[in-house]
Image (spheres, rainbow, N blue to C red):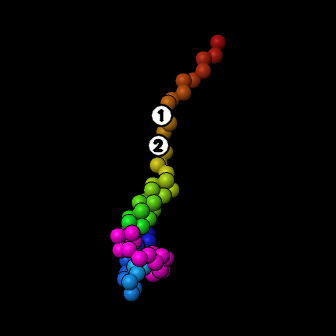
């Protein structure tokens, strides 16, 4: 899981993902907003990639066919 952080470099702010610098912006508020959006997207992707487990037994039972 990637952690996002924010560091100030001169008059700009750098967004980091893990150990990598990924974006430089001029506003602290915008950098924080981008981190929030990236976290939301990562969480949404994790929910899509983790399929729910199927039940072991089928929910509908089949009746045996009658033979005459």
33 horizontally vs 21: left or right: left
Q: Are marks 2 and 1 in contact (CB under 8 Å)?
A: yes
Quadrant of residue 36 within the rendered picture: bottom left
Q: Secondary structure at mark 1?
A: loop
Q: Position of residue 63 (x, y in %)?
A: 54, 24
The structure residue drawn at horizontal position 42% and vertical position 62%, both measured from the top left corner, is 37
Residue 28 seen from this side: yes
Q: Position of residue 50 (x, y in %)?
A: 48, 55
**The one of 60 and 12 positioned closer to us in this rendering:** 12
**The one of 25 and 65 positioned closer to us in this rendering:** 25
Quadrant of residue 29 within the rendered picture: bottom left
Distance from Cα at disc 2 to Cα at disc 1: 8 Å
Magenta residue check for 3: no
Q: Spot the residue most to the right.
A: 68
Magenta residue check for 18: yes
- The N terminus lies in quadrant: bottom left
Range of residues picked out in magenta: 16-32
Q: Position of residue 51 (x, y in %)?
A: 49, 51
Number of the label disc, if any, that sits on residue 41? none
Q: Secondary structure at mark 2?
A: loop
Number of the label disc, if any, that sits on residue 59? 1
Q: Which residue is mark 2?
A: 55
The structure residue drawn at horizontal position 48% and vertical position 39%, both measured from the top left corner, is 57
């Amino acid at each position: 899981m990637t952690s996002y952080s924010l560091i100030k470099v001169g008059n700009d702010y750098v967004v980091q993902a893990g150990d990598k610098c990924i974006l430089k912006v001029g506003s602290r508020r915008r950098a924080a907003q981008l981190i929030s959006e990236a976290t939301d997207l990562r969480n949404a992707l994790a929910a899509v990639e983790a399929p729910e487990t199927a039940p072991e037994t089928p929910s509908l039972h089949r009746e045996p066919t009658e033979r005459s």
